[in-house]
Image (tube, grey):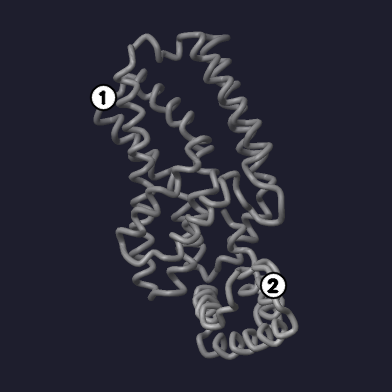
Amino acid sequence: MKDFDEKALTKELKIDAKAVGIPIGAAEVFIEKTVKAVKKSLKTKNTITNNDLKRLVAKELKKYNTDLAYVYKNRDKII
Amino acid sequence: MLIVVCMKLVPGVFALFFHYASGKYSKRKTDDLSVFFILGAETMVALAFFLINTLINILPPNLLTLGNNILTWIIIGILISLSLSTFLFYFRKGSGTELFISRKIAQCLNLKAKSVKNRSDAFILGLVSGIPEFIFTIPLYILSTITLIQSSFSPISCSCIIIFCALIIVSPLFITQIFYRTDHNLADIAKLRTKNKTFFRFFISFLYLALAALIITFRILIP
């Protein structure tokens, strides 16, 4: 079990966003919004599994960029 | 060779590696690293050929001739079992294109692809990423090497053929690189892989069976 790491998630999403081809400025704005929304959802829960957290982040990301959400959700299922 | 070209592990690791590298580094550094990944993959293919060639040369010459009926039937048996294995468990069940390799190895490769920092990391990743798939490819390398040994080509020609084969085998990596360079991303690649998953499962299975049928025809029925 480990604590939710906001910085690590933001860093990871920024790398994915740059790789997907999203301009840095736009990516920073919606990544911040996504992380805020995820943090808000987590306040109501004591624990959450990695898969559920991933689904939650992907659901939030999908509002802004479908490709980034798809990459975040499925990159562990490629190999 | 077509069967090895259709294998999905090395292109998958390369797609992940390219994704992470382009997210972290400049376009120039990503291209530079990807060249070393491809060189690593090529080296592993060439190494596999040369190691098998060396092993075959150590064994008694009459043991590994395709004219030997028992050996021919063993090879046919292996090819048929590989065909069945590809059909049944090359791809795991589920939405993505998860392969037969253990999840720990997949996670390790994913982690390594993410943490590539320099040329040597990229080269080593390219070198090792094909190893878990050897269970499906080694019989093909053995078959190709035996065919090369039995042919009348000179050692220099054999080496050139092996280098040429290595280039063909890593061609999916060049295609992936071109795909990335034409404004596509990992999401497009993952979607394409998922879309063609069933086709490749049938196609690789069929190729193994076709190879077995060819060997039966040309080594047993018409020797």
SS at mark 2 in the image: loop
Chain bearing tag 2 is A
Q: Distance from label 2 to label 1 (Cα)? A: 64 Å
> As displayed, is residue B84 above or below residue A46?
above
The reply to whether the C-beta atoms of the residues labelled 2 and 1 are less than 8 Å apart is no
Q: Count numbered badges in the picture.
A: 2
Q: Is residue B33 left or right of residue A58?
A: left
Q: Residue at x 31, y 61 (%)?
A: B119
SS type, badge 1: loop
Tell me which corner region of the image, top left, top right, bottom left or bottom right, holds residue A57: bottom right
Question: Which residue position is annotated with label 2?
Answer: A48
**Label 1 crowd bin: few (<14), some (14–19), many (20+), radius 10 Å:** few
Kind of residue at badge 2: Ile
| Residue at the image point whose x is 34% and y is 35% from the top | B162
Tag nearer the camera, 2 or 1: 2
Name the spot of residue B169 as percent of width and height, x first: 44, 43
Quarter of the picture containing the N terminus of chain A is bottom right
Could you tell me which residue is drawn at 29 percent across and 33 percent down?
Answer: B159
Q: Position of residue A8 (x, y in %)?
A: 52, 78
Callouts 2 and 1 in the same chain: no
Residue B189 in the image, given as x and y percentages of width and height: 58, 61
Question: Is the residue marked by circle 2 packed among few (<14), some (14-19), or many (20+) residues within 10 Å?
Answer: some
| In the image: residue B65, left or right of residue B73 | left
Who is closer to the viewer here, A15 or B191?
A: A15
* Horizontal and vertical percent position of residue B117: 35, 67
Q: Amino acid at mark 1?
A: Ser
Tell me: residue B158, above or below residue A8: above
Which sits in the foreground, A1 or A31? A1
Q: Which residue is mark 1?
A: B154
- At 66% from the left and 47% from the top, the residue drawn is B92
User: For residue B189, which numbered disc appears in the image?
Assistant: none
Marked residue chain, label 1: B
